């Protein structure tokens, strides 16, 4: 078996195709969740905490900052001062925790939907007892005679 035939057999296996579909759907779903976090949840969190919820500009200068340099991360980096820029990590970490919680709630809801039994069809009324059936037949016979 040639290498190309072996590769084609590998690529066409169900697991590989399922994985490819999962990656594509996961990428699209990731964009939806990013938008949910960035456009819906984070503005609410920012409003609750009274301002922009972005720590990406936080840093600690590890050297002497030259006079006249603005104390922004970009300006200090351009001045060549080594910095411990922890703010972006904190922002990404908070976004991750929120994103993980949102996905947890979505999966929990979907699992609840899966486990709920479908509504049962209304049960047919039980058959009447044999005595009632017999009495009904007698009644019908008596009506026919009259």
Image (cartoon, helix red, strand yellow):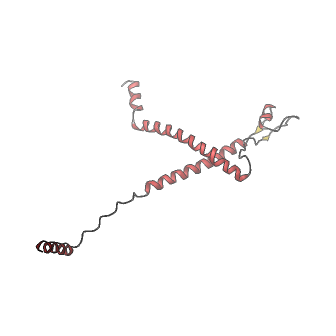
Q: 82 above or below 33?
A: above
Q: Is residue 65 found left or right of 49 in the rendered image?
A: right
At x 42%, y 38%, the residue is: 15
Q: 110 above or below 5?
A: below
- Which quadrant would the C terminus be assigned to in this image? bottom left
Q: Is residue 82 found left or right of 88 in the rendered image?
A: right
Residue 23, image x, y percentages: 50, 38
Q: 26 above or below 100?
A: above
Q: 59 above or below 122?
A: above
Q: Nearer the viewer, residue 69 or 49?
A: 49
Quarter of the rendering containing residue 9: top left
Q: Nearer the viewer, residue 133 or 47?
A: 133
- Which quadrant would the N terminus be assigned to in this image? top left
Residue 43, image x, y percentages: 67, 47
Q: Nearer the viewer, residue 6 or 133?
A: 133
Looking at the image, the residue that sits furthest to the front is 146
Q: Nearer the viewer, residue 88 or 117?
A: 117
Residue 85, image x, y percentages: 74, 40
At x 50%, y 54%, the residue is: 109
Residue 60, image x, y percentages: 79, 42
Q: Is residue 124 found left or right of 80 in the rendered image?
A: left
Looking at the image, the residue that sits furthest to the right is 67
At x 56%, y 42%, the residue is: 32
């Amino acid at each position: 078996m040639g290498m190309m035939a072996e590769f084609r057999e590998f690529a066409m296996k169900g697991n590989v195709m399922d994985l490819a579909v999962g990656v594509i759907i996961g990428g699209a779903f990731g964009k939806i969740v990013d938008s949910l976090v960035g456009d819906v949840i984070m503005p609410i969190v920012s409003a609750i905490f009274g301002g922009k919820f972005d720590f990406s500009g936080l840093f600690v200068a590890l050297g002497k900052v030259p006079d006249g340099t603005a104390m922004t991360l970009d300006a200090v980096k351009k001045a060549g001062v080594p910095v411990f820029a922890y703010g972006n990590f904190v922002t990404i970490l908070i976004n991750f925790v929120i994103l993980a919680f949102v996905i947890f709630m979505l999966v929990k809801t979907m699992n609840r939907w899966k486990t709920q039994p479908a509504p049962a069809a209304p049960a047919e009324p039980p058959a009447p007892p044999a005595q009632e059936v017999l009495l009904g037949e007698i009644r019908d016979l008596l009506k026919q005679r009259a």
